[in-house]
Image (cartoon, rainbow, N blue to C red):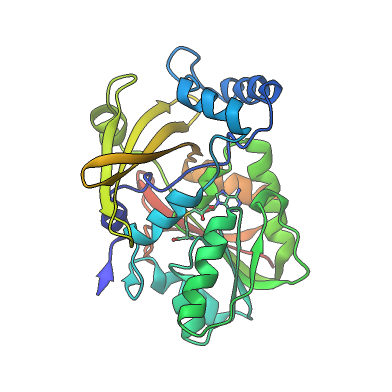
Amino acid sequence: MISSIRSAAGSYLAPFVQRTFLVPNDGRIAQIARRAFSTGWDNDRVQINPLLLKQLKETGKTMESYGKLSSECYGVWFPENQEYEDAALYRKYIQKSSQPALEVGCGDGRLLIPYVAEGLQVEGVDLSPYMIENCRKRAEKRGLSVTLHEQAMQNLDLPQKYGTIYIPYGSFMLVSDPKESQEAVRRFFSHLAPGGHLMVSLFIPTEHDIHVAAPKQDEWRLRREGQLPNGNVVRVWEKPFFDLKQQLECAEYRYDILSNGKVIGTEFERLTLRWYSQPQFAELLKRSGFSAIECFKGHSEEAAKSDESEFTFVAKKQ
Ligand SMILES: C[S@@+](CC[C@H](N)C(=O)[O-])C[C@H]1O[C@@H](n2cnc3c(N)ncnc32)[C@H](O)[C@@H]1O
């Protein structure tokens, strides 16, 4: 069965969370807030949730990129043993290039584990220790050995060169600082073997996402609901905010865990996603030395039209 990643996730955005609030003390809050506002957050509309501040003061930690619960939920939104609609395109490039390949933002191995099971050599890198741990567990369950690295893509520093570096599911957009995203692309270039390909999936929020689906300020909208392996129910609520000028989506997520209809735990997360027009992203690639740049519609091999909302860039290191 081919599963659509859009329908499996309920939304592209629901599982995306960023390590925005892994901060040790109040001084850093101001620093993070300044950075958030300087990248386009509207002070009146996007505020640090008081609950988060409380949690931050008590524990020194409020949110993490793909924290424990959201990483666990990822496996609920994306069950194993499915052929997802984006799998074929990356597989084709991995097979025709030198191996190993590297999946950046590999998560819990939705794509990586089936590729390794097929005999392809694919390593993974991810910022979230929880995602890495879940990926390892999933691999072990299938008797597979996987090579995983815990690193941020903007600091990528591995001893190996790769024939293909691929970043599925819009994960590149989670690096919202333009300097860091340029640095990430530069590092992808230096980690590719000559003749290797970089593949980056991107999307642009649709008019519907921005004007229809977004709830009013400060309202939580139910994003999705699922059942955890222990039988508890998880409900994900969100508050998205779109800054069209800066091309940023900033959203807060609240994960409620329910047992017998009662909320027994809550986890908050926040994400920032930067989107790119096709010419903007092509420019980013060129600036890092890439050539033979192609842009495909969705995960097909059909050239993307200029108004496509989901596309995949493939670029070559000559
Ligand atoms: C939407 S999930 C995609 C997971 C997997 N690639 C898939 O397609 O199912 C995004 C992943 O990117 C990771 N991530 C977020 N920011 C990152 C960064 N700066 N560097 C590396 N990984 C990051 C998250 O921890 C998460 O596992």
Residue toward you, 31 or 297: 31
The residue at the point 51 percent across, 48 percent down is: 67
Query: Image check: 26 left or right of 41?
Result: right
The answer, for residue 303, to whether it is visible in the render is no
Nearer-the-camera pick, 113 or 200: 113
Q: Position of residue 231 (x, y in %)?
A: 28, 58
Labels in figure, total: 0
Q: Quadrant of the N terminus?
A: bottom left
> In the picture shown, does residue 194 fall above or below 35?
below
Where is residue 239 shown, x and y percent of the image? 36, 29
Identify which residue is drawn at 38% across, 36% down: 254
Residue 70 is left or right of residue 63, and the answer is left
Decide if residue 153 is on the left or right side of residue 65.
right
User: Which is nearer the eye, 255 or 89?
Assistant: 255
Work out which residue is located at the far right of the displayed protein and give it: 159
Q: Quadrant of residue 204?
A: top left
Q: Quadrant of residue 61?
A: top right
Q: Position of residue 18 (x, y in %)?
A: 53, 41
**In the rendered image, the vertical position of residue 101 relative to residue 128, given as above or below:** below
Task: Quarter of the image for the C terminus: give it.
Answer: bottom right
Compared to residue 318, the image places residue 258 above or below, namely: above
Pick the residue in front: 168 or 224.
Answer: 224
Q: Picture coordinates of residue 190 (x, y %)?
A: 74, 61
**Residue displayed at 60% across by 33% down:** 59
Q: Is residue 53 visible?
A: yes
Identify the residue at horizontal 34%, vertical 20% (top origin): 218
